[in-house]
Amino acid sequence: MAGTKESPISPGRAEGEAGRQEELLIAENLVKRFEGVTAVDGASFSVRRGEIFGFLGPNGAGKTTTINLLTGLARPTSGSMYLKGREYTAHPKRAQALMGIVPDESNLYDELDGFGNLTFCAALYGIEKAERQARAGELLEQFGLKQAGKRPFKAYSKGMKRKLTIAAGIIHRPKILFLDEPTTGIDVASARQIRSLIGELNRSGTTVFLTTHYIEEAERLCHRIAFIVGGRLVRIGSLEELMKEHQQETVLELAVDHAGDGLAEDLRRRFPGYAVHRGDERHLRLVSEGSIELLPLLEAVARAGREVSEARLIRPTLEEVFVRVTGIESALMRQEREGKKK
Amino acid sequence: MSSWNAFRAIVAKDMRTYYLKPPNISWGLIFPFAWMLMFYLRSRTPLDIRELLPGVVAMSILFGTTSMLAVTITFERRSRSFERLLLAPIELSLLMLAKTGGAILFGILNAFVPVVVAAFVVDLSGIVWPAVIGSIVLIAATSTFLGLFISVSVHEVFEAQTFSNFFRFPMLFLCGLFIPVSALPIFIRPLSFLLPLTYGVDILKGAINREGILPLWVSFPVLLLFATGLFLFSLRNIKRKWVL
């Protein structure tokens, strides 16, 4: 895998996909150049069946271009793509029936109402009239848009538009749903609802490919995350793996009734392998290059006549990992996010 | 079968949301009617109306299709709803036939407005209707595909309008609609025969007034060739420009 820590995908592995049911989508060394500019630079990754796979990166990192390549809206300069084990690089129409695509801007038809938009989108996937009407009604209900079903799309709020666009993306029950920045530019309540809907869709079996530049969104929703910067995938892994990789030491925080200097000193003496730092009057922080055994520690605190009310492992946040891996400051991501909202 | 569901839905949506809107219907009715009325008021005998009919029919189709399609596609591309169609599992050729189908139907309907109006004023007996209908369908297809060609060449809606007029207005004078090609200066005549509408108008003139200068076996294939050529050229450009 070019530039990433995930193991490489050989062509043979993709071709022999029959036995590897869990990999729904595979991208191999995808490259996209536009007039001398490399937008995607050798991206290789796989999306596993049933997971939410996140693409996290700043604006212009190549997230949307990657989605365009995967969905057939752009042609790769080189590289291959496989869906359910079948290569579709040269013939994306074969794969499009199995994909649901929700772009970063709601792109339904202003003149049609909510119901009309959904039935039209269903017809594009060849669904018969009775079935598309039933499905449209079902989705309007599920997305809380039943009352607005007969209103024209142009009269919807941004949040409602985004929800209907997601509903249109799953009208044909796709195997994989591509969501490009689904919560960008909408209010907090709608964003929360949409995240909850994405979670529900995934729990009901839809595999999701999500791009975002909201670190907390990726952290909250995704099973695995790829960091993309300047068109290159710099790291792929589960949240656990990404955190673990950057957690060089174990940090444990204890909340005690009174964390005087005496207790900290006592613990340093008893546990020379741990560095013990006093936070405030109620908190001690223990740092170890290896693991920290909790039971002896609690016993030592009890022997010192103190009571532990909480013990918490302090882990690096995804934001810290992202900053360490990519070198991009989270402040810049936030700035871009605010800029995009405006 | 499933692709035909999509085809029907696209044509029906475009007819409903673009072509059969009150402003377009009134344009489709008023525009040919106004031209008919204008020439009727100027003409001395009922025979003149029949002479003008091929030109008015051709003009109604040209104005009803070319810019309408160019504008609707450019508009959908700007709003990105066209991406939705490109991402649907429908072959590009069928998709573009569906997108142009609504405009072709609208052009055909437009063409019959002056015919119906003329039927109340002059005797339309002796017209070779199969040739008229065939010509109307092919003029509608060619003009629509010209609109498709324009939409692939522009980015903004206003450009689509401007570019449409760049083609349409010269065609009014060069294709024999109101000035016979034989009456044009000799150095301009080759230009007339490079424009598809010349052949459509010639079929209509032959079928309505026995005034065609080219045999049907030349005009029909040439018109068909223009329609196919414009469609295939536009498809090639769509693949090149819109699927990056």
Image (spheres, grey):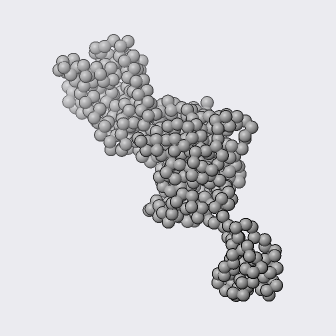
Residue in front for this viewpoint, A325 or A127: A325
| Position of residue B76 in the picture relative to residue A165 (left or right) | left
Q: In the rendered image of this protein, does residue B2 appear above or below residue A315?
A: above
Residue at 68 percent across and 67 percent down: it is A249
Residue in front for this viewpoint, A292 or A41: A292
Of the 4 image quadrants, the one containing the N terminus of chain B is top right
> Could you tell me residue A113's position as x and y percent?
53, 50
The answer to whether residue A157 is seen in the rendering is no
Residue at 20 percent across and 30 percent down: it is B42
The answer to whether residue A241 is seen in the rendering is yes
Residue at 60 percent across and 61 percent down: it is A321
Furthest residue toward left: B185
The quarter of the picture where residue A199 lies is bottom right
> Could you tell me residue A272's position as x and y percent?
74, 76
| Position of residue A25 in the picture relative to residue B197 (left or right) | right
> Could you tell me residue A207's position as x and y percent?
66, 48
| Position of residue A107 in the picture relative to residue A24 (left or right) | left
| Position of residue B147 in the picture relative to residue A283 (left or right) | left
The quarter of the picture where residue B33 lies is top left
Q: In the rendered image of this protein, does residue B95 appear above or below residue A236?
A: above
Residue in front for this viewpoint, B197 or A306: A306
Q: In the rendered image of this protein, does residue A73 appear above or below residue A145?
A: above
Q: In the rendered image of this protein, does residue A187 appear above or below residue A87?
A: below
Residue at 41 percent across and 42 percent down: it is A36
> Could you tell me residue A214's position as x and y percent?
55, 60
